[in-house]
Each structure stands twice: as structure tokens, then as C-alpha cells.
Amino acid sequence: MRRTNEFRVNPPPSRWGRTVAWVGAIGALVLIAVLFPRVLAFAELAARELRVFWWLILLLALGVWLAFFASKRRS
């Protein structure tokens, strides 16, 4: 008996499902910030430090780009 690829185990998610996932993730972050005020204070401090350490984030982004995009083999 021969199998065909007509049956998909994981169909691509719909736009509605992605929207619900994003709203749920943002809601979870807000809930965590409300339940744990220290997390909110840490996030605020981290946001302030980003102004000072922008170059560190730039180096991190460059490293990720080099690791994933520049190392691909060209066919």
C-alpha cells in the first residue's frame, strides 16, 4: 500500500489563531507584571539600561545574523 502526502498532521495556523496567540502572550506578560511588581521594576530598569548598552544589543544582533544568515551555503 502506497502512502500519499495528502494528509497533513499539522496544518498551517490560521490568522485568527495567530492573533489569539499574540493577545494571550501579551496578556500573560501583563498578568505577570501585575502579580509580581519586581518583574515590572526589572523590565523598567532593563529598558533604561538599553539606552546605555545599545552597542551590546547591536553586537548581539550582528552575531545572530552571522550565525543564521551568513553561514548558509550558497547553491
Image (spheres, grey):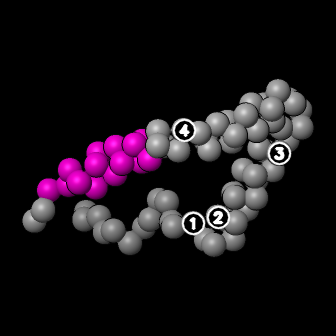
Q: Residue furthest left?
A: 75
Amino acid type at circle 4 is Phe
Question: Mark 1 and mark 4 in contact (Cβ < 8 Å)?
Answer: no
Question: Mark 2 or 4 closer to N-term?
Answer: 2
SS for dot 4: loop
Within 10 Å of disc 1 (Cα), the crowding (few <14, some 14-19, many 20+) is few
Q: For residue 46, which quarter of the picture?
A: top right
Distance from the alpha carbon under mark 3 to that under mark 4:
25 Å
Question: Mark 3 or 4 closer to N-term?
Answer: 3
Within 10 Å of disc 3 (Cα), the crowding (few <14, some 14-19, many 20+) is few
Question: Mark 2 and mark 1 in contact (Cβ < 8 Å)?
Answer: yes
Amino acid type at circle 3 is Val
Give the label, 3 or 2, closer to the camera.
3
Question: Mark 1 or 2 closer to N-term?
Answer: 1
> Which sits in the foreground, 11 or 40?
40
- Residue at 12% in and 62% down: 74
As drawn, is 22 to the left or to the right of 54? right
Question: Mark 3 or 2 closer to N-term?
Answer: 2
Range of magenta residues: 58-73
Q: Which mark is residue 13?
A: 1
Q: Please tell me whether the stretch drawn in magenta is mainly helix, strand or loop.
A: helix
Residue corresponding to mark 3: 30
Question: Mark 4 or 1 closer to N-term?
Answer: 1
Distance from the alpha carbon under mark 1 to that under mark 2:
7 Å
Q: Does the magenta stretch include residue 66?
A: yes
Asked whether residue 6 appears in the rendered view, the answer is yes
